[in-house]
Amino acid sequence: MTWILFLIILALFFDYLNGFHDAANSVATVVSTRVLSPKVAVAWAAFFNFVAFLIFHTGVAKTIGSGIVDLHIVDANLVFAALMGACVWNILTWWWGLPSSSSHALIGGLIGAGLVKGGFSALVAGGIIKTVLFIFISPLLGFLLSGLIGIIVFNLFRKANPFKVDHLFRKGQLLSAAAYSLGHGGNDAQKTMGIISMLLLGGLAGAEVEPIRDFLLSHHEMELVSQGQFIVPLSVVLLCHGAIALGTLSGGWRIVKTMGQKITRLRPVDGFCAESGSAISLFIASIMGVPVSTTHTITGAIVGIGSLRRLSCVRWGVANKIVWAWFITIPAAAAISAASYAIKVWLFN
């Protein structure tokens, strides 16, 4: 039981790191355009990260919990190794100032541990293929939507007084930043919900997990579990949204500079278009139950709105470095996870 509690705490720590690491995604545009101060911006983002559970269902959590590795092979060692792969990679990329994907780090962690424990047959191909496809689709969708919103906005206000436009979109960015933070909380917090639910409902011995399951699940939720359904307990939903909101409140400022200043120079109208485009992308993905990268989405949106002004407005060298971080995240986290699983089993089993 103590080991299971430790793993739940480790999962919530990953969720905190997710918020801390991805705070830059939520606030970079609104901070770099100086619409909000950093402290106010993270508080604004953290609030909407938390209340996202009121809007989104748990489709993403179910994909993570049962759509990456076979639920029947899940044990404490696999969950530990997956979380270690994700946490270590998150800390490394935060230290390097790279806006990599916490989501894909977790998925890589699950894949690495699943491969070591059960081989390729332990992996759920459909969920993995869908997730990998969205490595390309989510930034492209963010790019296209922010560009489309930008075209509409720039045409509507092309004859307006620049000072009035700036003033209007400073207010508009409060709404777009809130929408993006809702999408961030609605998609990213669910990944940890999936891990904890996997831990509670997977292939662990009953005596190990039953007391915690009885404590966290309501009577109605226990009935659904007894019928063989994969559910996400309300208590887990609240814990995960609280952890990601706390992480966002702490803020990962190393990445804010990369996202908000190094890719392209943003004005309030640009920030509004980028946040709106990426928020719509995240809403679509969450409704579909697809665990996407908020980092990929907002980066694509920032590049999209920067390209709309002029291709030379985008610092393509920085963007290229970010894209490389995207592609190595899953294999890097998988390698760390696989090593963690092997070491854990060798030392303690």
Image (cartoon, rainbow, N blue to C red):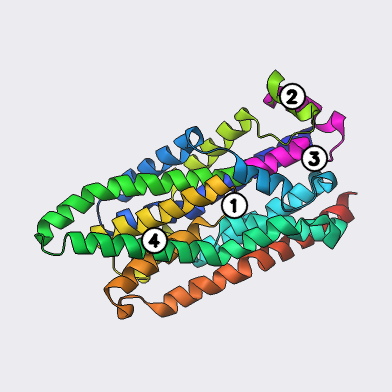
> Is residue 222 at all visible to an observer of this figure?
yes
Q: Amino acid at mark 3?
A: Gly
Residue 290, labelled with which disc?
Answer: 1
The residue lying furthest to the left in this view is: 161
State the residue in front, 312 or 337: 312
Q: Amino acid at mark 1?
A: Val
Badge 3 or badge 2: first in the primary sequence: 3
Q: CA distance from mark 3 to mark 1?
A: 21 Å
Query: Which range of residues does the magenta coloring cover?
Result: 192-216
Question: Residue drawn at (75%, 48%), measured in percent from left and top?
Answer: 79
Residue hosting label 2: 222
Q: CA distance from mark 4 to mark 1?
A: 18 Å
Report crowding for label 3: few under 14, some 14 to 19, many 20 or more residues within 10 A (C-alpha): many
Question: Residue drawn at (37%, 71%), measured in percent from left and top?
Answer: 263
**In what element is the residue under mark 2?**
helix
Left or right of 52 in this view: 120 = right
Q: Amino acid at mark 2?
A: Met
Residue hosting label 4: 145
